[in-house]
Amino acid sequence: MGVCLYLALMKQQLGNRFRLAVLDDVVMSVDRAHRKEFCRLLKTRFPETQFIITTHDKVWAKQMQTEGLVESTGCVAFHSWSVQTGPIVEQAVGIWDDIESAVAKGDTDVAAARLRRHMEYVAGELADRLGAKPRFRGDFSYDLGDLLPAVIGRYGKLLKLAANAANRWRNEDAKARVEALKTAWTEALAARGSEECVVNRAVHYNEWADFTAAEFREVVGAFKSLLAVLRCSSCESWLRVTPRKGHPESVRCRCASMMLNLG
């Protein structure tokens, strides 16, 4: 409420002259349920304002990138502060660069753990956006094995709905678009299925599998291909179902360059 009151006052007092704001750790644990909505508010209601945002919340830092509020190149991490050295400043890199860095150093176990954590985070985002239904867990501790199969099953059903809608409306362009997506999805699933056991072994066992850099890059490529199908190449947003409640009417990205009619 405090930050929303501040933003409303600045908008009222400054109007179009509200061009710069510093938000210092404004998201708390009690704000967990609406962190993503806050990202959308800043992006849509204040497009001409430059925000400098600090946070200790790594999840929210990722959500700001996922929602398009900031780019990965616009993030800086400060850590390992000491009197002698001051803070260690690190330009935040994309997760794939982070994984590649570990692979290049020969740290396959580190790369596998990073890949799995990233996939769990993204699978949770996609489950929310697509309306996937993983098996309920009372402790809410969903892992990749719970989330990813639910996302895969849900997206497959949505493609079937899109194909049925295109046939019903006799829309040849929509038919061709859906068929291309189904082909890309089938190919991505085939690659992912062949590599998934390798990642699981590397993450869950103390005696790490003896992967070469080339072998593990194939693993990374399989998961990147899977995610690429579920993300718009133009606006880089994940696909989502609209409306969020009730019968789904469409699957679309933020910029609507990817749009599938389901009705």
Image (cartoon, helix red, strand yellow):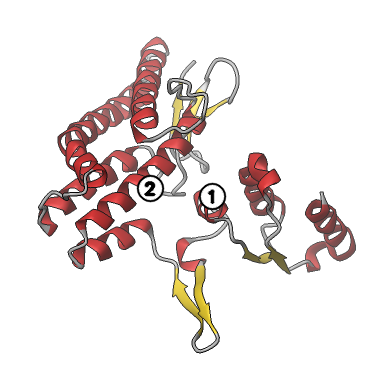
Q: Position of residue 113 (x, y in %)?
A: 30, 50
Residue positioned most to the top:
168
* Crowd rating for badge 2 (residues with CA inside 10 Å; few <14, some 14–19, many 20+): some
Q: Residue at x 37, y 13 (%)?
A: 164
Nearest to the eye among marks 1 and 2: give it.
2
Q: Residue at x 20, y 68 (%)?
A: 105
* Badge 1 or badge 2: first in the primary sequence: 1
Mark count: 2
Where 227 sits versus 15, above or below?
above
Q: Secondary structure at mark 2?
A: helix
Where 2 sits versus 135, above or below?
below
Residue positioned most to the bottom:
84
Please tell me the numbered disc located at residue 63: 1
Residues 188 and 193: in front is 193
Q: Mark 1 and 2 residues: CB-CB less than 8 Å, in contact?
A: no
Q: Secondary structure at mark 1?
A: helix
Please tell me the numbered disc located at residue 118: 2
Q: Residue at x 13, y 58 (%)?
A: 213
Q: Position of residue 96 (x, y in %)?
A: 32, 57
Q: Quadrant of residue 200?
A: top left
In the image, is 71 to the left or to the right of 193? right
Mark 2 residue type: His
